[in-house]
Every structure is written in C-alpha cells, then in structure tokens.
Amino acid sequence: MAAANVTSSLPRPRSPRAGRGLSGALGSSPLTFVPPRRTSVSPAIGAPRFSPARLTFVPLRGTSVRRAGRRGRARRPDSLAGVTERLTHLDEHGSARMVDVGAKPVTERRAVARAVVRMAPETARAVQAGDAPKGDVLGTARIAGIMAAKRTGELIPLCHPIALDHVDVEGEVDPDTGAVTLTATAGVTAKTGIEMEAMTAAAVAALTVYDMVKGLERGVTIESVQLLEKSGGRSGTWRR
C-alpha cells in the first residue's frame, strides 16, 4: 500500500510579509488606484460584478509621512517650529490647546465688532417700520446678541469663559441700500478676552435678523462680521 501523502495536510508556512497589511505587503513601492473598467449586474443574483482593479498610492508632491512618536502622537513637522510660537492655541506638536492665562495680569478690556446684513430695500423698510411678520426685528436681534456673548465660552471650543462687565448691540437700518448694521460692544476686567464675545454678539444678532425677515425675503445675506477695535491686554489697542 502506498504511503499517504501527509505533506498536503500540513499548514503552509506563512509569508514573511503576512499580517503586515497592505503597506507591509507592498513595502515602499508606489501604489495607484485604477477604477474598475466597467460595472455590470448579474441577472441571476442581481448583484454588481466588478472587473479587477489595481491600487496604487502615490504620495503628494512635497509631502512626507512621519512615524508616530511615543504615545501615538505624530512628530511635529519642522515647518511648525515657528508657527506654534505665533499661534498660542497650538502646542509644540501642532495640536490645538486652551491657552493657560493664569500668569497674565488682570486688565480692563473692550472690543467693538460689526455685522452687516443686506436685503432688498422693501424688506429694510419693513424692518425699520416694525412691520416684519415676527415683530420687532432689531429689538429681538439685540437681545439675541447679548445672550450669545454670555455663552461665547460654550460656543467657541478654546475660548475662556469670562464674566462680562458689559455687552450691548445697536442696530441701524439704511432702507435706501437695504443694509442693516449691527454693532456690538463688550467689556470685561479679566486676564483674557474680549474680541470673541463682541464678534459672537454681532454674528448671532445678524443671524437673528435673517430669521426675523426670512418670511419676507429668503435671499437676505450676512455680508460681513468683523472686529472694529479692541483695547487692553498685552497687545494693547488695535483699530481697523
């Protein structure tokens, strides 16, 4: 009786590259993705059939892949060395962080921001006369802006919550040009602030104007939200 062929039942040795995934199996060779030549549906099972495809990864020009450092954090590219010194919301690895303001002195700070909402002259006249479907547009926008300024630390992820000394929003309507201008002023005595609070107040007031008049006109546009001036703090006074 012939001897049984036992070698066919033995497990085959694994390839040295087995278990490394796609990058390990292909090493450093470039990869390219070639989409399927065509897609067809098999009438028997109703499932799509694809012709074979090849994959290739071609690195973007001027970029490189860095190995992750300890604890899984990527190493900081050399190009971030100077950037992180100017952008205080980035740490030495280029990751976002909340700035530590514990050592900063308490100063009086003030900021003024403005938002401009553009609409048809007829809609602006309705706002000015108080004839909008939802009622008093500017009064509602003013309260919305004040409320938003007090919640800035919850809306902007890395913004510090601060105790506002003052915030107000004023609205002005130009019916000839169809412009509604919202000016927000905010003040605080603190270690940080207060530009974001003023800009948040102006932005939310502008959004409220849109909500109040959208029944008259859907094409209303918020043209700009910008800081006009700020004072206090280490950087002193700045004006646009």
Image: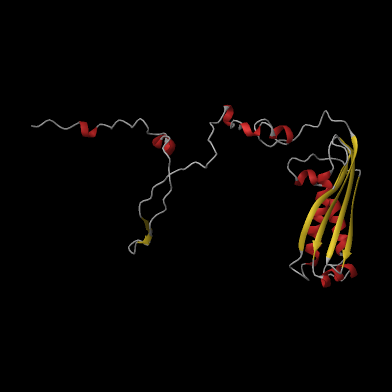
Q: Position of residue 210 (x, y in %)?
A: 78, 63
Looking at the image, the residue that sits furthest to the top is 70
221 left or right, relative to 17: right
Residue found at the far front of this picture: 62
Q: Quadrant of residue 48?
A: bottom left
Rendering coords of residue 234 (x, y %)? 85, 34
**Residue 88 in view here:** no
Q: Identify which residue is drawn at 87% across, 43% down.
A: 230
Choose top left, top right, bottom left or bottom right for residue 39.
bottom left
Q: Is residue 121 visible?
A: yes
Q: How many marks?
A: 0
Colouring method of the image: secondary structure
Would residue 25 be found to the left or right of residue 77 on screen? left
> Does residue 39 appear left or right of residue 69 in this picture?
left
- Could you tell me which residue is drawn at 59 percent across and 30 percent down? 75
Residue visible at 49% across and 41% down? Answer: 59
Which of 43 and 53 lies nearest the eye of the viewer? 53
Q: In front here: 125 or 153? A: 125
55 vs 9: above or below: below
Residue farthest bottom in this picture: 122
Q: Position of residue 188 (x, y in %)?
A: 89, 41
Q: Is residue 169 above or below residue 63?
A: below
Residue 111 spot, x, y in % from top left: 87, 45
Looking at the rendered image, the quarter that the N terminus falls into is top left
